[in-house]
Amino acid sequence: MEKMVTAEYLRSIYSGKRVFLTGHTGFKGAWMLQTLHWLGANVKGYALAPENRNDLYNQIEGDKLCYSSIIGDICDKQKLQSELVRFEPDFVFHFAAQALVRRGYEMPSYTFLVNAQGTAYVLDAIRSLAPAAIGVMITTDKVYDNPERGIPFKEDDKLGGYDPYSASKAAAEIVIDSYRRSFFNPSDYSNHEKAIAAARAGNVIGGGDFSENRIVPDIVRSISFGETVGLRNPNSVRPWQHVLEPLSAYLLLGAKMHEAPAPYSTAYNFGPNPEDMMTVEDLTKTFFEFYGAGSHTNFSEEGAPHEAKLLLWTVPKHTKTWAGNLKWMHVLPYNGLLNGMPIKSTARMKSVLHK
């Protein structure tokens, strides 16, 4: 597992393969779509329509990058299963989710429905596949029961969640583990030929993210319009990472599962080293320093819903090299990677993946 992510290696795995990608119209999903297309995969996307005209999927003309793009609800079990089974994918990457903490407070039952039940529907569809298949289920770093004591979480730590979003993703992890044990048990792989893994990563930043109540989009908007950005939780510590870091790790995980399905069918943390974690305020100042502009103010939001102030975790040694050691601050010079513009050229993609 010491193999680094290289374009040549990933292309040898994914070129010509059929990949079913849920959530392909979202921020991370659109980055994944573009990367898979660049690697030569035939991608069938399944997701809701983009929320906004300027969303990354529209900027990259995502429809043109798909073998087929299906606009559908992950909670429409019959349609999802029909589209997935008919495609007979070699790989399934499940990104579709209600991914915002604040929206989880506003729409709690919907958040649980999409994140937990939707994941079960994807796994049910994989059960219906006749051919062998690899499934990588994308969750989050917020799946752990977090008392905020400054102790980094390991993959086998207790799952839980204070807010509906975190709890729904912890529930999804329980669903994944149950299906893996009950229907896709690695010890019985020769009979079912399905390998399922969970990939945990969060606090992802990158171009094309226009979500509400997310710090980097707020920073970019404040710089663009000459406004002051307000920080609700300036001292909160997060494992920030550029979007290509977890995506390259997901791709390498899928590649390793392709080569040896049973041993890699488990859950993984993907994130930066502890020394690369920083507070919201420090991240904001780093952006302002690089761009030579910007200002911020700290404020206390009366009656604000709970959000964890401290989130630390460990990244096992055997996965630390998977993401190519691309630190988010190193891509600041690549303005398009962070200021809302997508990567469109092979040269730029090569600059952030090892050749």
Image: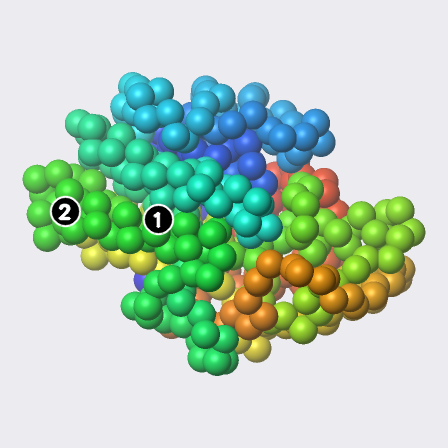
Quarter holding residue 280: bottom right
Name the residue located 56 percent from the left edge and 37 percent from the top edge.
26
Is residue 167 visible from the viewing direction of this image? Answer: yes
Name the residue located 80 percent from the left edge and 48 percent from the top edge.
221
Name the residue located 58 percent from the left edge and 70 percent from the top edge.
309
Name the residue located 48 percent from the left edge and 80 percent from the top edge.
149
- Upstream in sequence: badge 1 or badge 2: 1
Residue hosting label 1: 172
Residue closest to the eye, 28 or 16: 28
Q: Image height check: is 187 above or below 48? A: below
Residue farthest to the front, as pictured: 303
Residue farthest to the right, as pictured: 226
- Locate the N terminus by quadrant: bottom left
Q: Image height check: is 252 above or below 53? A: below
Residue closest to the eye, 111 or 302: 302
Percent coordinates x, y for residue 267 in the rendering = 31, 58
Total marks shown come to 2
* SS for dot 2: helix
Q: Image height check: is 286 above or below 94? A: below
98 relative to 335 in the view: left or right? left
Q: How is the image coloured?
A: rainbow
Q: Amino acid at mark 1?
A: Ala
* SS for dot 1: helix
For marks 1 and 2, give the CA distance.
15 Å
Residue hosting label 2: 182
Q: Residue 260 — which label?
A: none
Is residue 31 visible from the viewing direction of this image? Answer: no
Percent coordinates x, y for residue 294 in the rendering = 87, 60
| Residue count near mark 2 (Cα–Cα under 10 Å), binned few <14, some 14–19, many ≥20 | few
Q: Amino acid at mark 2?
A: Ser
Mark 1 and mark 2 in contact? Answer it, CB < 8 Å: no
Percent coordinates x, y for residue 303 in the rendering = 66, 60
